[in-house]
Amino acid sequence: MNITRPLLLCGLLALLGQALPSPALTLLTEDWPPVTFQNDKGLPDGMAVEVVRAIQTRIGDNSQIQVQPWVRAYNSLLGDGDVMLFTVGRNAERERLMTLLGPILVSSTDIVALSKHAASLRKLPPAELRRLPVAAYRGSIFATSAKAAGFQVADTNDPAQSARLLLAGRVKLWVDGNVVMGRILREKGVNPNAVEKILTLDKLDLYLAFSPRVARQTILQWEAGLRAIKQDGTFSAIHRRWFPQEQPPPQVELLGIQH
């Protein structure tokens, strides 16, 4: 049996495999203004979109950003190939499923009510308060946090629907990130003072999330890009433009399965 030819073919295939470039990333985000959203021109926009594009400029990446419903985008992150989804809240389960790079924003998970009901709701015993339905968009970490705290979650399709349910009186409570609630209300022509915080469930660091099959080399390139824009002031300038009252997170962390 002539084994020379099979060995040569195996060697050639190995060399070709090494020469192939890394697969292009699929960049996904959601409609969660002002962090991420689709603007009036149909283009991705928002604070985190600007951060991602600044990193892309540094590392020479030209992948297009797609705005998708959260559940679809999150399922793609877990089930498809080379996917990066932003922004993703950090928790222990997600660190076992993906690689997280950031943080790029810090939010608090707040439960709010209409101002006219806030005083009476604060007087309720904790157990009674937790029996009230709280609107939260399906699959979000905010819904997860509310369920973990013992609240009865009423799933919605997006944060805007959660706000509509609250404003219409169909639920008494709404849970979401504090950084988006004001923008969502203003877009509906409602003064943000129309709602009041009942309690804060937790603080939440938000990250870029890479699917399990993304090459470590690619993730390290993105890490270097994030470090660069945090060091030269680009990141702080973007953060300050969108959230002038908040402090930008200075650190860079790589967490999860490829940290």
Image (tube, rainbow, N blue to C red):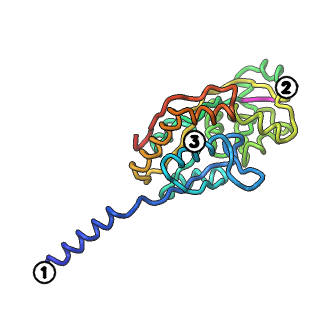
Above or below, 237 relative to 225: above
| Residue 58, position as x, y percentages in the image | 50, 46
The quarter of the displayed image where residue 41 is located: bottom right
Residue named by callout 1? 2
Which residue appears farthest toward the front when viewing the image?
Answer: 232
Instruction: Identify the magenta region.
Output: 111-116
**Disc 1: CA contacts within 10 A as few (<14), some (14-19) or many (>=20):** few
| Residue closest to the far left | 1
Rendering coords of residue 112 (x, y %): 76, 29
Question: At x 72% / y 42%, what residue is drawn?
Answer: 33
Q: Which residue is drawn at 26% across and 71% down?
A: 12
The residue wearing badge 2 is: 115
Which circle's residue, 2 or 1, is located before the other in the chain? Answer: 1
Residue 223: which disc? Answer: none
Q: In this view, does 232 lie to the left or right of 197?
A: left
Q: Which amino acid does label 3 sit on?
A: Val
Do the residues under discs 2 and 3 have CB atoms within 8 angstroms?
A: no
